[in-house]
Image: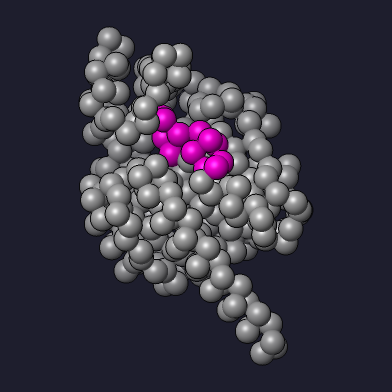
């Protein structure tokens, strides 16, 4: 539970001191985005937590509260329910999920061990807002989905109808669009003060690739890796994404061991 809504969550792997929480993207995403491509492989050596963002998958769909602050509160509730108190976690987020992970890390840097931001569309009011505004009528939702082939990711029949219904509900029956349009850029000071290691993973053909360059300059401990993909990196380049995350985690482990030995 988070406030007055229910969040659907799943834990993969055995209890471990290494915990990764995966956050999916807006509208088409849900916890299944990460299950087979990332959660299962990583669960061999760590615990992985997946959950559906509010308004997605099996989680509740409130009429409001789709701002980054509310999403960060939801993540806090998931951690409170599934992770030992004061334990730090590794966060992996795609698109809106990346912005939520970044927001949470700026609020609670002591709870975050590392960040993997996958094609973070920062600021969302610039990169995401115009697309949502293009869905300008309930009758036009199907055409809006058709104009973005990877949004449906091959869904047909009942799956496609559920996607259409979700888009219609989120866009026309909630505060989602207004909340996204209010998602501006964090201050330079807030980004510069974030101490955690950050892996920025962007598609070479992503329309928001320049956001990755900006984050690389703004964050003090970040590295940028480009993959052969557009914006939907988890769908278009899942194996390459897994490989760079595993390399990133291995390097962070080596650094922690070295720091521990030096103390």
Q: Position of residue 180 (x, y in %)?
A: 36, 36
Left or right of 93? Residue 200 is left
Observer-nearest of 49 and 156 = 156
Q: Position of residue 125 (x, y in %)?
A: 30, 40
| Residue appearing at x 37%, y 31% in the figure | 153
Q: Can see residue 224? A: yes
Up-down: is 194 above or below 149? below
Observer-nearest of 23 and 180 = 23
Q: Magenta part of the protein: which range?
A: 25-36
- Where residue 258 sits, quadrant-wise, is bottom right
Up-down: is 219 above or below 22? below
Q: Is residue 27 magenta?
A: yes
| Residue appearing at x 56%, y 41% in the figure | 35
Position of the N terminus by quadrant: top right
Q: Is residue 40 magenta?
A: no
Instruction: Tell how many labels.
Output: 0
Q: Position of residue 202 (x, y in %)?
A: 33, 55
């Amino acid at each position: 539970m988070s406030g007055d809504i229910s969040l659907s969550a799943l834990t993969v792997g055995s209890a471990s001191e290494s915990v990764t929480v995966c956050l999916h993207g807006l509208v088409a995403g849900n916890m299944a985005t990460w299950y087979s491509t990332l959660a299962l492989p990583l669960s061999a050596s760590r615990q992985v937590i997946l959950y559906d963002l509010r308004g997605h998958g099996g989680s509740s769909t409130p009429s409001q509260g789709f701002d980054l602050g509310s999403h960060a509160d939801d993540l806090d509730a998931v951690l409170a329910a599934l992770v030992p108190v004061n334990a730090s976690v590794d966060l992996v987020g795609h698109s809106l999920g990346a912005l939520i992970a970044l927001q949470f890390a700026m609020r609670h840097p002591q709870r975050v061990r590392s960040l993997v931001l996958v094609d973070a569309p920062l600021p969302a009011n610039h990169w995401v807002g115009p697309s949502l505004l293009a869905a300008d009528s309930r009758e036009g939702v199907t055409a809006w989905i058709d104009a973005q082939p990877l949004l449906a990711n091959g869904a047909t029949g009942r799956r496609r109808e559920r996607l259409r219904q979700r888009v219609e509900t989120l866009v026309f029956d909630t505060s989602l669009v207004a909340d996204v349009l209010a998602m501006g850029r964090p201050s330079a000071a807030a980004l510069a003060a974030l101490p955690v290691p950050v892996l920025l993973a962007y598609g070479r053909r992503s329309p928001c690739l320049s956001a990755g360059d900006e984050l690389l300059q703004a964050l003090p401990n970040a590295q940028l890796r480009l993959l052969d993909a557009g914006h939907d990196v988890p769908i278009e380049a899942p194996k390459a994404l897994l490989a760079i995350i595993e390399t990133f985690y291995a390097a962070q482990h080596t650094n922690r061991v070295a720091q521990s030995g030096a103390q």
